[in-house]
Amino acid sequence: MKRFDAVVIGAGQAGPPLARRLAAAGKTVAIVERKLFGGTCVNTGCMPTKTLVASARVAHVVRRAASYGVTVPGPLEFDLRRAKARADAVSTDARQGVESSLRDTAGVTVIEGHARFTSRDTIEVGEDVLSAERIFLDVGGRARLPRIAGIEEVPHLTNASILQLESLPRHLVIIGGGYVGLEFAQMYRRFGSDVTIVEMGPRVAAREDEDVSSAISGILEGEGIQVRVRAECISVSSDRQGVTARLDCDAGDRTVTGSHLLLAAGRRPNTDDLDLDRAGVAVDARGYIRVDDFLRTNVEGIWALGECNGRGAFTHTAYNDYQIAVANLLEGDPRKVSDRIEAYALYIDPPLGRVGLTDHEARKTGRALLHGKRPMTRVGRAVEKDETQGFMKAVVDAETKKIVGATILGTGGDEAIHGILDAMYAGATSTTLARSVGIHPTVSELVPTLFGELRPLT
């Protein structure tokens, strides 16, 4: 048995900085990784997909070059193999960086293999037995396969396996109108594939307000993507053209056939093969590890960080989990998950940046609210770039003038939203932002105008 002060299971976005920080505090640390260092973000999430999104945007801009007065000789040709090689290089560099930083850290022992609990403080990794007073789980998640008849018998892709394609699908059918499905839909359409999105609900991006969902649909449909909503995929089968999905729908064709099928119907945590029951660690009905506001599980000495705890499915929330754990354990600072303001982006083009509550969620609080909305057609920077799709909007507490939430769907929205997010963390009011002076010409300069034109939200 090898004894450590702490064992970290998983080398995603929370585990490695936690291991390094504990080692810097004089602790002996083992970090266990069974597959790829860096977790989802580095290997099958943010880094490779946003690299491909960048390639897709270049293709899109080239197609529009004439409208900017630029002549491009010859027809556009897209080389997925080269785009994939670039994405692979970005991921590989990041993955190797994470691994080497851990191996070079004094006090950290890197162990490769599959970890399983044997008791509350003991873990087996192959023939190694590790014991520690403190154990941290950062095991991430993976694509969830929907319950569709025939799904096991047909070739299908997930967000991970689609990254291995080196030739373009003739027609990509995507099951799921959430964020993963939407990003791949626009990406592959811009690469040159026909694309159909099949969403069982009444709209895509269902967690957003209806005006946001509608605008997103319009953006995608404007690029030639077929968006099928209220269409549940009930079975799939193979044929000579690829894969046919049979739909339960109120309108439109009852089948859709594509050369490739992408399943983008949610995520599940990687907690089903850790033998958590041997340690007594509680999970919810979906397999996510239950944690309190300080990321502690129900078992003393065991914490869960990152996607596997169900408190955030983003790189930035996983890293914040690391910060919360370190603040409580080493710095005497009682930071909590509930201090975090929800914020994220959807990387279609133009992107969506979101912070705080949606209009719908804000209304449910029962508070008197103020609201502002401005189309991107009235944002000079967007007009100059000829990228005027979308809008920005915000909702504010009418009594305190505290900012409740904001959305920017438009060019630069993923960056411009941070000015509002920072103001919310600082406790600034809408009045403060309304009186600020931004730089012209930017998207952010219209944020003061947005907050200066607030009206009661009905």
Image (spheres, helix red, strand yellow):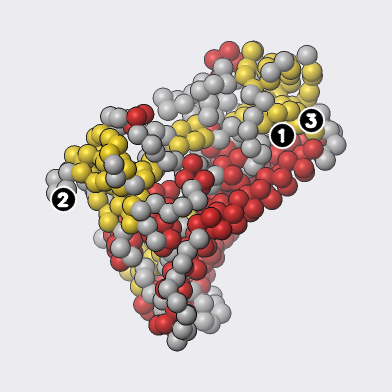
Question: Which amino acid is tagged 2?
Answer: Gly
For the C terminus, the image quarter is bottom left
Q: Can residue 63 be seen in this view?
A: yes
Q: Residue 330 at what x, y percent from top left?
A: 75, 37
Question: Mark 2 — residue?
Answer: 252
The mark nearer the N terminus, 3 or 1, is 3
Q: Which amino acid does label 3 sit on?
A: Thr
**3D distance between C-alphas at marks 3 and 1:** 20 Å
The relative height of residue 216 versus residue 197 in the rendered view (above or below) is below
Asked if residue 208 lies left or right of residue 351, the reply is left
Of circles 3 and 2, which is in front?
A: 2
Residue density around tag 3, few if under 14, some if 14–19, many if 20 or more, within 10 Å = some
Residue of label 3: 109
Rendered image: mark on residue 198? none
> Which percent across, then down, holds residue 378?
38, 79
Report the front residue among 457 and 102: 102
**Which residue position holds label 1?**
329
What residue lies at 51% left-to-right and 23% top-to-bottom?
272
**Residue at x-position 80% and y-position 33%:** 108
Dot placed on the residue nearer the N-terminal end, 3 or 2: 3
Task: Check the image and name the residue furthest to the left.
Answer: 250
Q: What residue type is labelled 1?
A: Leu
Toward the viewer: 394 or 352?
352
Q: Is mark 2 on a helix, strand or loop?
A: loop
Q: Nearer the viewer, residue 278 or 434?
A: 278
Front: mark 3 or 1: 3
Residue 284 horizontal/vertical position (percent): 45, 25
198 vs 293: above or below: below
